Image (cartoon, coloured by chain):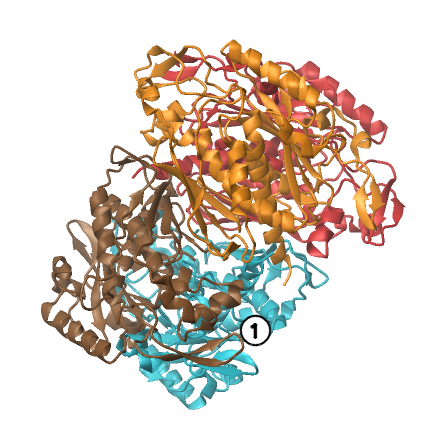
Chain colours: A cyan, B brown, C orange, D red
Amino acid sequence: MSNTFGDILRITTFGESHGPAMGGIIDGFPAGIHINLDEVQRLVDRRRPGQSVVTTARDEKDRVEVLSGMLDGMTLGTPIGFIVRNTDQRSADYDALKDCYRPGHADYTYTAKYGIRDHRGGGRSSARETLCRVVAGAFAQQALRQLGIEVTAYASQIGDVKLKKLHYECDLLSIEQNAVRCPDESIAQSMIDAISKAKEQGDTLGGIVTCVAQGVPAGLGDPVFDKLHAQLASAMMGIPAAKGFEVGTGFGFASCMGSEVLDAWTVRDGKIGTITNHSGGIQGGISNGEPIVFNVAFKPVATLMRPVACINAECQLVEVAQQGRHDPCVVPRAVPVVEAMAALVILDNYLKNKATRI
Amino acid sequence: MSNTFGDILRITTFGESHGPAMGGIIDGFPAGIHINLDEVQRLVDRRRPGQSVVTTARDEKDRVEVLSGMLDGMTLGTPIGFIVRNTDQRSADYDALKDCYRPGHADYTYTAKYGIRDHRGGGRSSARETLCRVVAGAFAQQALRQLGIEVTAYASQIGDVKLKKLHYECDLLSIEQNAVRCPDESIAQSMIDAISKAKEQGDTLGGIVTCVAQGVPAGLGDPVFDKLHAQLASAMMGIPAAKGFEVGTGFGFASCMGSEVLDAWTVRDGKIGTITNHSGGIQGGISNGEPIVFNVAFKPVATLMRPVACINAECQLVEVAQQGRHDPCVVPRAVPVVEAMAALVILDNYLKNKATRI
Amino acid sequence: MSNTFGDILRITTFGESHGPAMGGIIDGFPAGIHINLDEVQRLVDRRRPGQSVVTTARDEKDRVEVLSGMLDGMTLGTPIGFIVRNTDQRSADYDALKDCYRPGHADYTYTAKYGIRDHRGGGRSSARETLCRVVAGAFAQQALRQLGIEVTAYASQIGDVKLKKLHYECDLLSIEQNAVRCPDESIAQSMIDAISKAKEQGDTLGGIVTCVAQGVPAGLGDPVFDKLHAQLASAMMGIPAAKGFEVGTGFGFASCMGSEVLDAWTVRDGKIGTITNHSGGIQGGISNGEPIVFNVAFKPVATLMRPVACINAECQLVEVAQQGRHDPCVVPRAVPVVEAMAALVILDNYLKNKATRI
Amino acid sequence: MSNTFGDILRITTFGESHGPAMGGIIDGFPAGIHINLDEVQRLVDRRRPGQSVVTTARDEKDRVEVLSGMLDGMTLGTPIGFIVRNTDQRSADYDALKDCYRPGHADYTYTAKYGIRDHRGGGRSSARETLCRVVAGAFAQQALRQLGIEVTAYASQIGDVKLKKLHYECDLLSIEQNAVRCPDESIAQSMIDAISKAKEQGDTLGGIVTCVAQGVPAGLGDPVFDKLHAQLASAMMGIPAAKGFEVGTGFGFASCMGSEVLDAWTVRDGKIGTITNHSGGIQGGISNGEPIVFNVAFKPVATLMRPVACINAECQLVEVAQQGRHDPCVVPRAVPVVEAMAALVILDNYLKNKATRI
């Protein structure tokens, strides 16, 4: 429930954006895995704000401090605790929000639930919480790599700019070469232009992140309620601003005939495979050995760079100026979060699958 | 994990479609709720095949037998066990599938996972399992009704035929008046025509189910990993053939500017509300008191009414004729399943929310 | 929570003693295990009342009907649903209890919790629920046997009659040769005499069940909160009438010096072992390869065969005569329940342990 | 599983004794509770070593740093993260243990489970982990106090010295007045003498902690597997060195007749109560409103102050001198840990009970 994710491999996080620190515990991580902590830090840095013109100007250092669970660079099988101190906070920026609720944010709903909220920088609802997911995901990605599994996400749509190519038509290694993390330089430039234009107008943009997991063996996933894509959907919808999930052909299936989208069998490298991959690598909730492919839709950030009408507990509308510093589009920074959550789901299911037989 | 869904209110199901029975246990259901078992049976009957030309011809009786957890029509707070006997099985229909895997089905992936599978009628992967969810959902819906919460789903797209109206522009009480469960008679007729045409061609169709939950109080949902829409996404992606989920404006957000979709505050009946409902009734993962609205995309059924190329464990393609009896489109029968799962999620969160304060 | 036990291997049960049926779902059971259902029935029969003078006279048939999860005698990895119909009920025996609470029973506390209770035969609090545990345990025991693990329990004390021998001084195969399940014929006879005497007086007796698990490999158990003996303690304290648990030397440790009870190392069959086994086969919460040994204390049954003072909701004392049919001592019938729960814990931990490394 | 405890109120801990820090996350803690952090620190200090001649000489500062979940002294309903830095470590003391296993410790079993272990100071198996439980318990105790519930534990036996009085015959407020935490000055002195004598001999002593929870309302506890005493047993057996648990008359029931220990009804302050309390405040797994009373047996610490024979992975016995600094008897420092775990169980069940009805 709540602040824990996963079944055998579980991540629990804590932290308000303007409190002393964010942090988490990775439990159930397999023992005896060599972890490169510099690589963990590198993935966390990818999520960091202030990387480019399309992200916010805050310069958080976000140094990950691992407090347990490792000896001489190797995991012990015991829980891995970590923290990241919060710095560069301008909490006073948020004073005006103490007694009122911004539209499109969690201010009102947190108060409805708990009767109290930390109004500074979104408190617990801040997307800053996702850095803890990236830390955990970075551990998972290193374990997956030893199993020959690679998870890659990228921006496939920002505003009206869409990447039409499919994942196997792109060079997924090129993603980090532009500020929006799109594996097509020309589309990337159009996306950057769109974001810049929105930013000039004090506005924000939505978009889509596509994620591909390659090398996942057949057999992962629980076939009834916890279908592999049900777990992925849950993981993705738990990311702030995520509003849609689809696996394989997804919503496109709605207007298709069965004969158009039936993934016909083939044999590849002596193993059973499918010619097309409309199912996105999952059949009956279980991986079939094909690449797992899914999309996540993100809404435009609710914080506009212009005054908006907030409401207070007395039901009065109050105009409040721009608060804090925010990205005009979450998609570029959501990419590593999507990868992290996907990696956690896949490693968890890899571990669960080992218990299927004695 | 696996065959259990929910946190405090939990449903666990069992059953292969051609085994002796399907069944389940509803645990954590609140005590002291009057349950009308005829109404439970009525909802189960909605899911039943053989209701119309657009569904399969099997005539399963699907009589629900409640075995525990109630006394004199009232819940005891103890687990509610129930079974539904399997009848009208033609297991021999499936003999040809014993040693080969159909495309687009779970035959191969179950075998990859477990090393064994029940090949008769899809075994555990049969959509027949969802009748257990409808039983549990029917209990939840009766409890929700006492709380003033009503969950309604309907077909909003089948193949290329789309219902353009939004939920508040339709008479949701009219849904049962046509075979596809669409709250617009004219669109419903087009949908029926589309299904009939596909059926004639031995083909199948995908579609979309829209679901609306009205009367949900503000404050439900766990705000980090288990956001209310993350739980709904998981619940919906666990339904057979479901391949996409979106809440509120969903994938439509991707091409929007923030200023276009920011739900501005208003005051309604002395309570805080929003003028538009792009967020689908959920902000920061917690319900805000507006109607909860989401869509679920379903793929066309993989079982075509014509011979398809199966593959066997020796990687040989084998042509196998049509097996069993199947719907040309799952959407009409998915409607009560979507309602059931949504009701379970909402009641579970209602109960969880009670523990937020002492 | 509540009616589910276990982490990966989970048993969920339902049923009131005078409702239509008891039953359960075994989920997470490994695939591909041959199960002898006659052997399952045989273990259930061991728990059955009416076996001897020392148990109650009810003659319940308790036929186990397995409804799912198996094909041709082999487990599928899918949930195993089962039911046992309730028969030979004399519900009217309990009419006098409808509005009052017996001392030493759960009548009052169930009402305090749920505001309602099934007063017939203890309802959900009836020890009849444990037959579902025995069914699940019987499956687990067959899987464990394939792993070379054998779980055996026996009566080691009834009233003042104590078996002084330790488990390795007894022939554990002789347990079924007497009505009290004590592996010493002479002590068994004294126990039977003690029970008969108590029964004549309309009184009841407490006792202790000892359990030994042999062949458990080193490495099972979660080392912090879910120590192997913490899981066993939870499993045992969940059995009706169980009031105490100790592992190895247990309460005897309290009056010992460390030097007296330190299990010194030895080498046995080329493997690390201990000379003594004060720790009961568990160190730091993890099995060490020695036999796991623990005791469970049971209170005397609260139902005396004489009138007792009950109390009603209006706080009035009411004399009520003997109700229903009850054992004068639960120990003999608790033996198979202890074995079942121990088997479930050990198999669950065997499966969990597989996820410790990739 | 593993490093998380609780259902709705959950504590997850991390930390090796010689790593950078210990810490944890308290999740599901109710919102809006005023917490006195000085009081939390005071309870942690009670667990600290170096308090008296009967505890070890290490002087750890154990300053608790709360990192999230609170604003202006009040809980937010969000997860409460905290850490305690490890200081005063003499890791080199443990070099000799790197490649061998001490008797009576978790060295061998951790290695069997994980293939790797942190050999310094017991690593994750160190009792130092329990300070995280005390932090969490301190939060729970403050919430319970607002509900009128008070949890108190004390030493009732150390070696052969037994406190014969029952809890209501003692002044439970006097517990902190002596080094062993026994509510009888004269017995306390005998216990101190016994520990001193054992210490002189380089030996250690076991003992028993008794715990009493007063003011617990009737209705708490899940009646089947998770009986309130099953949860308490699990909580207590998860404490290092704990080897036995009994509720109420516990093992004493074994030699009793039912008529001797049947808690007869009475009416107290207009409410239903029992004259005696053999059941320890729990009937059918649910609290009945009487004080909850249980005992926990602790083994003598395995670390003797004299050379012991360790064993290495090559099955060779190696004599190793005394390592680190250890208590000659864990009981005095176990008292606050028992209180903490009991408080967590009771508050968790209080919260769970709120979901029993709508």
Question: Going 37% across and 75% down the picture, which residue do you hit?
Answer: A208
Residue B222: x %, y % from top left: 38, 53
Circle 1 residues within 10 Å: few <14, some 14–19, many ≥20 = some
Q: Nearer the viewer, residue C280 or C67?
A: C67
Residue C255, compared with residue B144, is above or below; it is above
A314 horizontally vs B241: left or right: left
Residue A52, compared with residue D232, is above or below; it is below
D154 horizontally vs A324: left or right: right
Q: Nearer the viewer, residue C55 or C5?
A: C55
> What subunit carries mark 1?
A
Q: Which residue is mark 1?
A: A149
Quarter of the figure that contains the C terminus of chain C: bottom right
Residue D72 shows up from this direction: no
Quarter of the figure that contains the N terminus of chain C: top left
Q: Quadrant of residue D134?
A: top right
Residue D65: x %, y % from top left: 57, 47
Residue D257: x %, y % from top left: 55, 14
Question: Going 69% across and 55% down the picture, which residue do you hit?
Answer: D114
